[in-house]
Image (cartoon, rainbow, N blue to C red):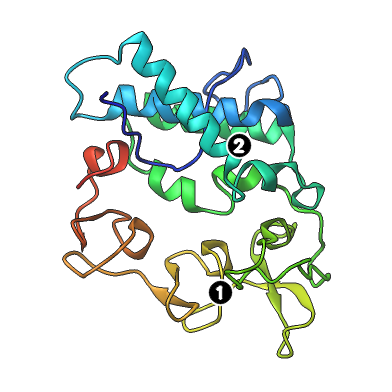
C-alpha cells in the first residue's frame, strides 16, 4: 500500500460540499459532522497531486484507504474531532468552507509548499475555530492540559476569540485567561501559545526560535523550514511537505 500522507495529521473528504478555490466566493458551509471528511479529502488530494515520490495516481482502493484512515484519525484524535465538537472552540461552518478552499488553492498554485506555514498559523487552517472568549476573559481548562495523566481539555486552549492571544495560566496556575501569545522563553503547551516564528519546545514547555538547516530535530515544527527528516532540519521541498520525508 503506497498511502503515507504527510503534510497534516488531520483528517479530510468534502462529503458532497460544493467548494471552489476562491476563498472570497460563495461556498456551501461545511457542517460539523462533515469537517473530518472535508479535511480527509484535502489531505489525500494533496498527497496524490503533489507528492513527487508517487509513480502515478492512487488506485481507487488506495484513495479510499487514505481517506478512511485520515477521517478516523480526525474523529478519534482529541486534538481534532472532540475539539471541533466543543462549543467553546466556536466551530464556524462557513469559515471551515473558506479555509478548505484555501487549502485547495495551495494545490492549484503548483503545489505551493507555503501550505506548511498556513497549516500551523492560528489564522490559517484552524481559524474555523473562531473561539468564544473575549480578550482578557477567563478560559480556565476543566482539566490540566499539561498533565499527561489527565484528559487534556484542548478546547480551552482554542477558546480565545482574538487569534493574537492564547489561553494561559496566572502565576498560581489556578486561573487561566486569554492573553498575548508568548515570546521567546515564555511558557507554552501548544504551538498556538507562541508568536509566529517560534515553536513550543516540549521539554522545557517554553517558546523557542525555530532551528536552522542541519540542526538536530524531532519534529517539523522545530525547524525554520518546517521540515525535519532523519533527525535533522532539511530544506523545505514538495517531498518533505506532501510526502512526509525530506
Residue 213 placement (x, y as % from top left): 19, 64
Q: Which residue is mark 2?
A: 75
Q: Quadrant of residue 23?
A: top right
Considering only order in the chain, which callout, 1 or 2, is on the residue closer to the N terminus? 2
Mark 2 → mark 1, Cα distance in angstroms: 25 Å
Seen as rendered, the residue at the extreme top is: 60
- Compared to residue 191, the image places residue 124 above or below, namely above
Number of other residues with Cα within 10 Å of mark 2, as a class: few under 14, some 14 to 19, many 20 or more: many
- Compared to residue 246, the image places residue 177 above or below, namely below
- Compared to residue 11, the image places residue 142 above or below, namely below
Residue 62 placement (x, y as % from top left): 34, 17
Residue at (38% x, 60% y) in the render: 221
Residue 125 placement (x, y as % from top left): 55, 43
Residue at (57% x, 26% y) in the render: 38
Q: Quadrant of residue 186?
A: bottom right
Residue at (78% x, 82% y) in the render: 174
- Compared to residue 152, the image places residue 105 above or below, namely above
Q: Residue 109 got which mark? A: none
- Say whether residue 111 is left or right of residue 196: left
Q: Which residue is mark 1?
A: 188
Seen as rendered, the residue at the extreme bottom is: 171
Foreground of the two, 236 or 142 = 142
Amino acid at each position: 500500500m503506497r498511502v503515507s500522507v504527510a503534510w497534516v495529521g488531520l483528517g479530510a473528504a468534502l462529503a458532497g460540499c460544493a467548494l471552489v478555490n476562491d476563498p472570497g466566493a460563495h461556498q456551501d458551509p461545511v457542517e460539523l459532522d462533515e469537517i473530518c471528511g472535508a479535511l480527509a479529502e484535502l489531505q489525500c488530494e494533496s498527497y496524490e497531486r503533489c507528492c513527487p515520490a508517487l509513480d502515478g495516481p492512487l488506485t481507487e482502493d488506495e484513495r479510499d484507504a487514505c481517506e478512511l484512515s485520515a477521517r478516523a484519525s480526525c474523529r478519534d484524535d482529541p486534538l481534532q474531532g472532540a475539539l471541533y465538537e466543543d462549543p467553546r472552540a466556536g466551530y464556524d461552518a462557513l469559515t471551515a468552507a473558506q479555509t478548505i478552499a484555501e487549502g485547495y488553492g495551495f494545490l492549484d498554485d503548483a503545489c505551493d509548499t507555503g501550505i506548511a506555514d498556513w497549516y500551523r498559523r492560528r489564522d490559517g487552517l484552524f481559524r474555523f475555530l473562531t473561539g468564544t472568549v473575549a480578550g482578557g476573559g477567563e478560559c480556565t481548562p476543566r482539566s490540566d492540559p499539561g498533565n499527561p495523566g489527565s484528559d487534556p481539555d484542548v478546547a480551552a486552549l482554542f477558546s480565545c476569540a482574538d487569534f493574537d492571544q492564547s489561553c494561559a495560566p496566572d502565576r498560581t496556575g489556578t486561573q487561566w485567561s486569554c492573553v498575548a501569545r508568548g515570546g521567546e522563553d515564555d511558557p507554552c503547551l501548544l504551538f498556538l501559545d507562541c508568536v509566529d516564528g517560534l515553536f513550543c519546545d516540549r521539554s522545557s514547555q517554553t517558546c523557542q526560535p525555530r532551528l536552522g538547516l542541519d540542526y538536530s530535530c524531532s519534529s517539523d515544527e522545530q525547524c525554520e523550514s518546517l521540515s525535519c527528516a532523519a533527525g535533522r532540519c532539511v530544506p523545505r521541498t514538495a517531498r518533505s511537505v506532501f510526502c512526509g520525508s525530506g
